[in-house]
Image (cartoon, rainbow, N blue to C red):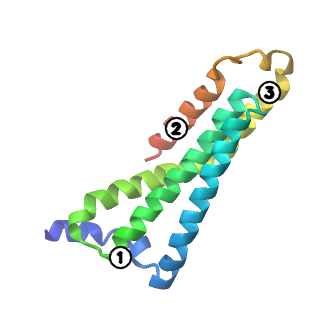
């Protein structure tokens, strides 16, 4: 048990955050996650954008939601830093890191998608119209970069 307690002390970011900031951050996380879900549902149901852009933008929202959920789990576990929850905390921390990397790469992915749409304007509207191959390809490449950085 001492080894796990020593590992648990490694995660000081959440445990060193003052209690009042954690209490303020929790409702903000819930509100931001709710807004992100509403935005994603509206984006998918409206269908006013190209399917590749929708896939890339849903990838942005998904990385944001994973980041918010894992931060929520980290904060909830930090209220009672029980060594039995070390592996859950470590998993949430690793997922939070991966989603943070994904958030950092989101702008690059959006720019690549928009530049390719502008350069290939004649073929882009017909390309992957029934199924968004290009958007899924960009999302997979982005995810592989983010997991690789862990």
Residue 17: % across, % down: 46, 78
Mark 2 or mark 3, which is nearer the start of the sequence?
3
Q: CA distance from mark 3 to mark 2?
A: 21 Å
Q: Quadrant of residue 32?
A: bottom right
Residue 64 percent across, percent down from the top left = 57, 52
Q: Position of residue 91 (x, y in %)?
A: 34, 54
Identify the image quadrant of the N terminus.
bottom left
Q: Is residue 129 left or right of residue 102?
A: right
Is 24 in front, or is 13?
A: 24
Is residue 54 visible in the rendered image? The answer is yes
Disc ID at residue 79: 1
What residue is shown with label 3? 117
Q: Residue furthest left?
A: 1
Does 99 appear above or below 14? above
Task: Please state which of the two labelled residues, at mark 3 or mark 1, is closer to the viewer.
Answer: 1
Q: Secondary structure at mark 3?
A: helix
Residue labelled with disc 2: 143
Residue that appears at 30% across and 72% down: 9
Judge from the rendering whether residue 65 lies leftward or rightward of residue 114; answer left or right.
left
Point out the frontmost of discs 2 and 1: 1
């Amino acid at each position: 048990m001492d080894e796990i307690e020593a590992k648990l002390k490694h995660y000081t970011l959440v445990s060193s955050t003052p209690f009042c900031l954690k209490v303020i951050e929790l409702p903000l996380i819930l509100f931001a996650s709710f807004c992100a879900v509403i935005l994603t549902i509206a984006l998918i149901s409206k269908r006013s954008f190209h399917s590749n852009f929708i896939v890339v933008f849903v990838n942005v929202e998904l990385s944001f939601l994973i980041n918010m959920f894992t931060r929520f789990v980290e904060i909830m576990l930090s209220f009672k830093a029980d060594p039995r929850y070390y592996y859950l905390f470590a998993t949430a921390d690793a997922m939070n890191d991966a989603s943070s990397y994904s958030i950092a790469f989101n702008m690059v992915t959006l720019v690549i998608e928009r530049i390719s749409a502008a350069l290939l304007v004649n073929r882009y509207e017909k390309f992957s119209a029934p199924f968004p191959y290009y958007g899924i390809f960009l999302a997979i490449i982005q995810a592989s970069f983010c997991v690789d950085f862990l």
